[in-house]
Image: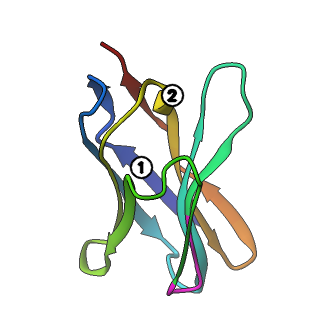
Amino acid sequence: QVNLVESGGGSVQPGGSLRLSCAASGSIFSINGMGWYRQAPGKERELVALVIGTDTINYADSVRGRFTISRDNAKNTMYLQMNSLKPEDTAVYYCYVRAKLRNYWGQGTQVTVSS
């Protein structure tokens, strides 16, 4: 079992920045994928950034160049640095881990970008 807890969401103006954190606990070994997804009201959950294995990083076209995924292995924490935020980035953001052929999700953290 893997437990994921997101934090760092909030409300910012366009052009602002936020850093989301995802703290992992439990059986966090044999992880073969991890990343961030988001879901806006009335829309399906979509990929934001995904780490495949340990070295391949994929970003959605809409966030590439603005968002950066990273992790601190010592703290078992994954981050999403979000810069130059746009109103269309408004959504609930979920951290994601795939371990031992199972998918794990955090509870979500709200990000709101508005003037």
Residue depicted at 24% across the width and 34% down the height: 16
Residue depicted at 69% across the width and 79% down the height: 100
The total of numbered circles placed on residues is 2
- The answer to whether residue 107 is seen in the rendering is no
Kindly identify which residue carries mark 2: 88
Around disc 2, counting alpha carbons within 10 Å, would you say few (fewer than 14), some (14 to 19), or many (20 or more)?
A: few
Position of 63 with respect to 31 (left or right) is left
Tell which circle, 2 or 1, labels the residue nearer the N-terminal end.
1
Foreground residue among 2 and 105: 105
Outermost residue on the top side: it is 115
Around disc 1, counting alpha carbons within 10 Å, would you say few (fewer than 14), some (14 to 19), or many (20 or more)?
A: some
> In the rendered image of this protein, does residue 22 appear above or below residue 102?
above
Foreground residue among 56 and 8: 56
The region drawn magenta spans 50-55
* Label 2 vs label 1, nearer the camera: 2
Image quadrant where residue 43 sits: top right
Position of 44 with respect to 22 (left or right) is right
- The answer to whether residue 32 is seen in the rendering is yes
Quadrant (top left, top right, bottom left, bottom right) of the N terminus = bottom right
Residue depicted at 72% across the width and 19% down the height: 42
Kindly identify which residue carries mark 1: 5
Let me know if residue 51 is in the magenta part: yes
Quadrant (top left, top right, bottom left, bottom right) of the C terminus = top left
Q: CA distance from mark 2 to mark 1?
A: 24 Å
Q: Are marks 2 and 1 in contact (CB under 8 Å)?
A: no
Position of 110 with respect to 79 (left or right) is right
Foreground residue among 102 and 63: 63
Residue depicted at 44% across the width and 24% down the height: 87
> In the rendered image of this protein, does residue 100 appear above or below residue 114?
below
- Tell me the SS state at disc 1: strand
Amino acid type assigned to the residue bearing label 2 in the image: Glu
